[in-house]
Amino acid sequence: MHASKLVVFIGLLCLVITACNNKTTYDTIIRNGLIYDGNGGEPYQADVAINADTIAFIGDLKNASAKNEIDANGKAIAPGFINMLSWATESLIQDGRSQSDIRQGVTLEVMGEGSSMGPLNATMKKQMQEGQSDIKYKVEWNTLGEYLNYLEKKGISCNVASFIGAGTVRTYVVGEDNRAATPAELDSMRMLVAQAMQEGAMGVGSSLIYPPDFFASTNELIALCKEASKYGGMYISHMRSEGNKLNEAVDELITIAREANIPAEIYHLKAAGKNNWPKMDSVIKQVETARASGLKITADMYTYLAGATGMTAAFPPSLQDGGFGKLWQRLHDPAIRKQMAKAMNTDAKDWENLYYGAGSADNVLLLGFKQDSLKKYTGKTLAEVAALRGKTPEETAMDLIVEDSTRIGVAYFLMSEDNVKKQMALPWVSFGSDEGSYTNEGVFLESNAHPRAYGNFVRVLGKYARDEKVLSLQQAVYQLAKLPATNLKLKKRGELKVGNYADVVVFDAATVTDHASYEKPHQYATGITDVWVNGVQVLKNNEHTGATPGRFIKGPGYKQ
């Protein structure tokens, strides 16, 4: 054969060989899974390919290969879940792996229920530093954006976002006193909201049963929300009442949404206290009537019958005027203590008495203390500790707050299982843990978590979707991922779709289970086997990889 013909022949042979071996390659392929894409439709069999931080292909990838291949045969593949009410603000500083939530498939923590980690003035930074309990850290930021950038730089496994707290803005400008903001102060507060929105805040968050948020008028909240609305943000609120004035509180939230022209969400939807359980039907009607009128009203919830907050939620806000330091001083006055004990046993109409709503001190569980000398009471009820100390539950509550110099974390048993199921089936309800994200070791074992920190999201998939058929699995995935992503106006998240960020969860729908209890809360959920955040695998075959690809997810008003 002539040399030139030989060259041509060899060239053609190489082309044929190349064509036969020209498999597309990706960074990751998840094979043989059942796709729950987040839209609520029927699942379908397919493979998922990831390149860098993006979903590159969904379909049949039998002729493709990848550096990292996962066989998801018999398992579900879903978009990463969103925790709409996260208190991982400090736990992520301590340990960025976010294990209790990552192991539930949560890839985004959304913070800012009333108080946020910025903006902070010098006084607030000092208080934050001095008020630290088990987790110690240096406050190295001033604004909310700086805090979220600090977390990203430090290294976190999950994505993070935050609302700006209405109470934080109020404290920054007005302080913790029970008074109306002056027009000039309100202007300053609006400027802080505008700055936070430009830094990437999701909107304004309030927590209206607690001082100083309790001191804010509806008009003040409307003014702040109008500012957030300019940047496409939303309003999200722990409403002024979840009990005796629940319907009135829903009306206030709807009024704020209408007047400020802003979407609004109810934090941890509930009817608290047995006398209020029948109100849930009318609350649902209020929301659905507002939605039918064109307002964007949504809610989130946790999947447990007990809430968790401070013991101080048993005291009237009027006695907390001026902040915790003033309350601590008042608790040394015998006359005020007598007044406080009486108030604790009052079915109050002008403030939210969670102690009364719980029904008795047997339904108040002590979760955590700052002082080592008091940690022996962790996991006991207030009634049990009162008996040990030979005092009334009311006196014991006040004594513990004085001795610990904190608000003391407690769980109040307040809700009905029937309402939990009724709420969960609503297509406008997403989910939030109202807790930190922990590792079940080290400093985190110094206090008891609420079990929702370890089980809130997996309970939706296992207990309620699979076992009790309260909602379908595809609807559960929609409410865990696509619904909150849509409400937050997130781009390219919340859905398994080519071109979206690769926040992906693989789980065994037949076995996914929560294990945390009130007695033993620090127990990881099982059944979530693999998790990717921004294309990087953070959970592999049930084990955390240690990777920290989490990012600060900016809201719609972000300006570089």
Image: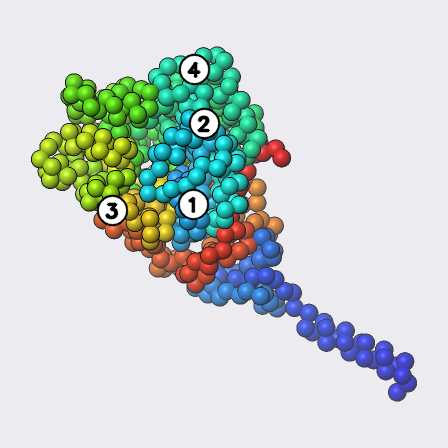
Residue 181 badge: 4
Location of mark 2 (residue): 122
Label 2 vs 4, first from the N-terminus: 2
Q: Please identify the quarter of the rendering in which residue 128 is found.
A: top left
Residue 529 coordinates in the image, percent (x, y): 42, 60
Q: Residue furthest left?
A: 390
User: What's the distance in space between the residues labelled 4 and 1, CA to CA?
Assistant: 34 Å
Q: Label 4 sits on what residue type?
A: Ala
- Of mark 2 and mark 1, the one earlier in the sequence is 1
Establish if 137 lies above or below 23.
Answer: above
Q: Secondary structure at mark 1?
A: helix
Q: Amino acid at mark 1?
A: Leu
Q: Are marks 3 and 4 in contact (CB under 8 Å)?
A: no
Which residue is label 1 attached to?
92
Q: Which mark is residue 518?
A: 3
Q: Work out whether residue 46 can be spotted.
A: yes
Please report the residue visible at 45 percent of the width from the left and 27 percent of the height from the top.
122
Is 196 left, or right, of 217 in this rendering? right
Q: Along the polypeptide, which appears first: circle 3 or circle 4?
A: 4
- Categorize mark 4 by other alpha carbons within 10 Å: few (<14), some (14-19), many (20+): many
Q: Which secondary structure, mark 4? A: loop
Question: Which residue is depicted at the point 50% across and 52% down?
Answer: 548
The residue at 16%/21% (across/down) is: 334
Q: Are marks 2 and 3 in contact (CB under 8 Å)?
A: no
Q: Amino acid at mark 2?
A: Ala
